[in-house]
Amino acid sequence: MVARLARDLVERIDGLNQSIDALEAEITALVEPMAPTLLAIPGCGALTAAKIIAETADIRRFHSAAAFAMHNGTAPIPVWSSNTPRHRLNRGGNRQLNCALHRIAVTQLRWDGPGRRYFDRRIAGGNTKKEALRVLRRRLSDVVYQALRADTATSAPRSEIAA
């Protein structure tokens, strides 16, 4: 009885994995023509890019990278403790976009690249790990904004893609 239940569970898991792989391939096929510059960012995969595109809706509605940062919750909030000016995490904004930027940041920290070097430089400059990660996410917000602007300028209108 236990062996049959285990076999059924493994078959179900295998079927779900196949469904997940099929959906991921479908999402990748839809995202690649829409956002090649966004996908070129290290650490930004097709699923993260799809989340960013969906949550942003249209990058043209943001007049600047700072407005996009306010929307995604990466714009710093200044706070003062005694005579030390600091910035704290912004708990506002679109948390889904912030989570996607966090995934990109954490992925970049695993590799030896510009994100890791910037993080290490901030740590050496006296920031805590949380502060350095917050600053990296803010910087990535600007990179994603520029990538989305570039993709919008070069891509076909959305009505042609949907057809």
Image: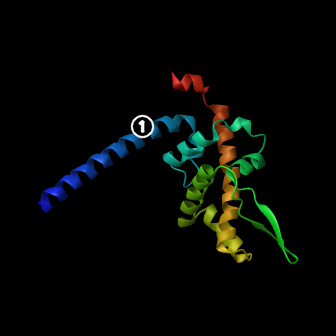
Residue reaching furthest to the right: 83
From what the image shows, is residue 26 above or below residue 114? above
Q: Residue drawn at (37%, 45%), measured in percent from left and top?
A: 20
- Indicate left or right for 138 with 8 as reference: right
Tell me what residue is drawn at x 71 percent, y 51 percent: 142
Viewer-closest of 68 and 154: 68
Numbered-mark total: 1
Q: Position of residue 163 (x, y in %)?
A: 51, 21
Residue 147, x across and y down, in percent: 65, 44
* Residue at 56% over, 62% down: 106
| Residue 137, placed above or below residue 155 | below
Farthest residue, direction left: 1
Q: How is the image coloured?
A: rainbow
Q: Position of residue 28 (x, y in %)?
A: 46, 40
Mark 1 nearby-residue class (10 Å; few <14, some 14–19, many ≥20):
few
Where on the picture, by quarter, is residue 58?
Answer: top right
Q: Amino acid at mark 1?
A: Glu
Return the residue at label 1.
26
On the rendered image, what quadrant is the N terminus found in?
bottom left
* 32 horizontally vs 102: left or right: left
Q: What element does badge 1 sit on? A: helix
What residue lies at 74% left-to-right and 77% top-to-bottom?
126
Judge by depth and name the residue closer to the eye, 112 or 18: 18
Image spot of residue 156 (x, y percent): 60, 27
* Res 129 → quadrant: bottom right
- Residue 102's quadrant in the figure? bottom right
